[in-house]
Image (cartoon, rainbow, N blue to C red):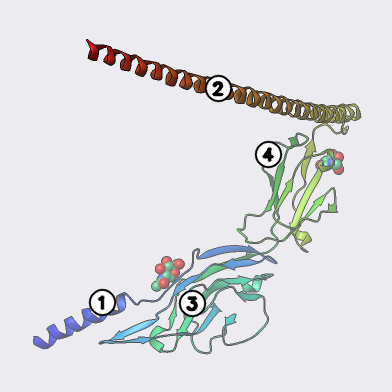
Amino acid sequence: MMALRMLVVCCSCWLLLTAAEIPNIIYPFTSTCAVEGSTVTLPCSFTPLTSVTEGRKTIYRKIVRVVWCRNHLICHGPTPTVYDSEIQRTSRFQYLGDMETVCTLQIWNIQSYDGGTFRFRMEVNDTVGHFTNRTGVTVKVSDGVQMEISSSGNHSELRKGGAVTLRCSSHCTTHRLEVTWFRDGHALPESGPALQLSPLSAEHSGNYTCRLKAKARTTSQPFSLKVEGLEGANPALIAGVTCGVLLAGVALIVSLVFIRRARAAAAENSRAEEQTQQQDTSREVEDVSYASVHFKQFNQARKAVQDEDAVIYSSVSGRG
Ligand SMILES: *[C@@H]1O[C@H](CO)[C@@H](O)[C@H](O)[C@H]1NC(C)=O
Ligand SMILES: *[C@@H]1O[C@H](CO)[C@@H](O)[C@H](O)[C@H]1NC(C)=O
């Protein structure tokens, strides 16, 4: 009984310990369809087991190898791989990840024999940390699909000066499609799945087709685009607009010159005014001080007279 209880405690301890340390691998989508010849990206992220606690000791683990394999559940040991961090090789399989958290795989120019389920495996410097997520990403490679053109506008008649985006796609979800666009049979320089036309002019009118690069079989049905006003720009209108712009420019320059002159004149006037004002005020100050000087002298004179009166008065009373 005692032994059983201890076993249970130990087990739950171990579970708790490992619960925080479970490595994982996430594939944001687990199936995709790719058109033969296209580039496919399989997003992937992982959390490795970086440390294990044994009693009080923490042992750090390091990722030593990462691999991607096709149609194998755990990709272990000598299983053939499409990517192996230990093997240097040039191939259509490119690892866009690292040894820490990102494990994205990209497949260039995918072929029908590439179809299958791809799985990622990480290996650390301790077998406890080796891990493969068996879910994997299933890739279906579609051959001989016909591309389709769709338009961002809801009708094929468009206004001059407007904008429209044509998209080349197929029922198969694909990533980073490389397509070739044609207008009336002539190849265009753009190679993305979205063709942006703006500002629209008469020369954008025509029958558009698209196909996967170097895959004539995938050529779409033509998409007819018509931009209104095929006769081209009206020369009289252009002349009118040009004249208008020129006139406006001249008017602007003339008014600027006038404003400048007016400002300069105003500045001159106010300077002159200030000067005369200054002269006036100084004259006033002189007048005021002159007056106060006179007033003071007058007061002193009066005081002297009063003193004499007082003396006279006292002498008179002394006699009486
Ligand atoms: C395996 O991958 C699937 C799909 O991304 C994910 O839902 C699951 O949690 C993963 N399992 C582990 C243990 O990482
Ligand atoms: C586009 O194709 C239609 C028939 O599908 C044709 O009548 C039209 O003339 C073509 N336009 C150009 C500019 O080639």
First along the sequence among labels 1 and 2? 1
Q: Dot 3: few (<14), some (14–19), or many (≥20) neighbours within 10 Å? A: some
Tell me if residue 229 can be seen: yes
Check the picture and name the quadrant holding the N terminus: bottom left
Give the residue at x 22% y 82%. Answer: 11
Residue that badge 2 annotates: 290
Q: Disc 3 residue type? A: Glu
Residue that badge 4 annotates: 153
Calculate the distance from the C-alpha at mark 3 to the C-alpha at mark 2.
Answer: 97 Å
Residue that badge 1 annotates: 16
Residues marked 3 and 1 touching at CB (< 8 Å): no
First along the sequence among labels 2 and 4? 4
> SS at mark 3?
loop
First along the sequence among labels 3 and 2? 3
Q: Nearer the viewer, mark 4 or mark 1?
A: 1
> SS at mark 4?
loop
First along the sequence among labels 4 and 3? 3
Count of all numbered marks drawn on residues in the image: 4
